[in-house]
Image: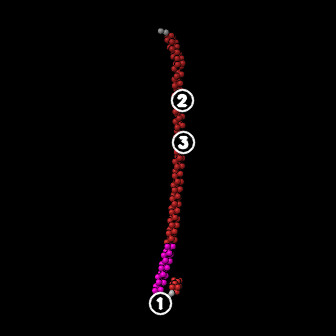
Amino acid sequence: MNINFTLISQAMAFAIFIWFTVRFVWPPLMRAIENRQKSIADGLAAGERGRNELELASHRSADVVREAKHRATDIIAQAEKRAAEIVEEAKAAAKDEGDRILVGAKAEVEQEVFRARETLRQQVADIALAGATKILRREVDAKAHADLLASIKAEL
């Protein structure tokens, strides 16, 4: 065997192999590599978008929580203010009711005092009449008797 022939035939076989690889094997491998690079790049971009959206959602949730706490404190403050107002209204109503009851009681006491005075006047007039009747032991006419009682009541 001739070394030149072997070398040339190996070079030709190698050239055919390179042509075949470049023509039929290399394009599908390049497409697969490019698709894989593209899918990896898309995955990384999606991961980055997800991380950004997570940060935004975290900030928004923190804002919502802060706003909810603020509103809760406002509602609690309003409730405490309203409770204080209700207590003050109840105190005022109780004071008014107490004043009304006190006025009614005073009026009732005054009426009882007036009735007691009238009863006492009547009893004093009856006692005075009985005493006068015993002293005089005589009959006085009805008109004089009524005048006498009226004057005694007026004096008392």
Mark 2 lies on residue: 38
Residue 32 in percent (x, y) is at: 51, 25
Q: Residue at x 46, y 88 (%)?
A: 133
User: What amino acid is labelled 2 in the image?
Assistant: Lys
Residue mark closest to the camera, 2 vs 1: 1
Residue 74: image location, x then y, percent? 53, 54
Vertical placement of residue 143 versus 99, above or below: below
The front one of 21 and 134 is 134
Amino acid type of the residue tagged 1 in the rendering? Arg
Magenta residues (range):
106-135
**Colour mode of the rendering:** secondary structure
- In the image, which is nearer the foreground, mark 1 or mark 3? 1
Residue closest to the eye, 61 or 39: 61
Mark 3 crowd level (few <14, some 14–19, many ≥20, 10 Å Cα): few
Any magenta on residue 128? yes
Q: Nearer the viewer, residue 45 or 84?
A: 84
| Residue at 52% in and 45% down | 61
Label 2 or label 1, whichever comes before in sequence order:
2
Residue 128, x across and y down, in percent: 47, 86
| C-alpha separation, residue under disc 3 versus residue under disc 2 | 27 Å
Sequence-wise, which precedes: disc 3 or disc 2? 2
Is residue 95 shown to the viewer in this render? no
- Cα separation, mark 2 vs mark 1, equals 144 Å
SS for callout 3 = helix
Q: Residue at x 52, y 15 (%)?
A: 16
- Residue 4 lies in the magenta stretch: no
Furthest residue toward top: 1
Q: Which residue is mark 3?
A: 56
Q: Which residue is mark 1?
A: 138
| Crowding at mark 2 (Cα within 10 Å: few <14, some 14-19, many 20+) | few
Tag 3: amino acid: Leu
Q: Earlier in the sequence, mark 1 or mark 3?
A: 3
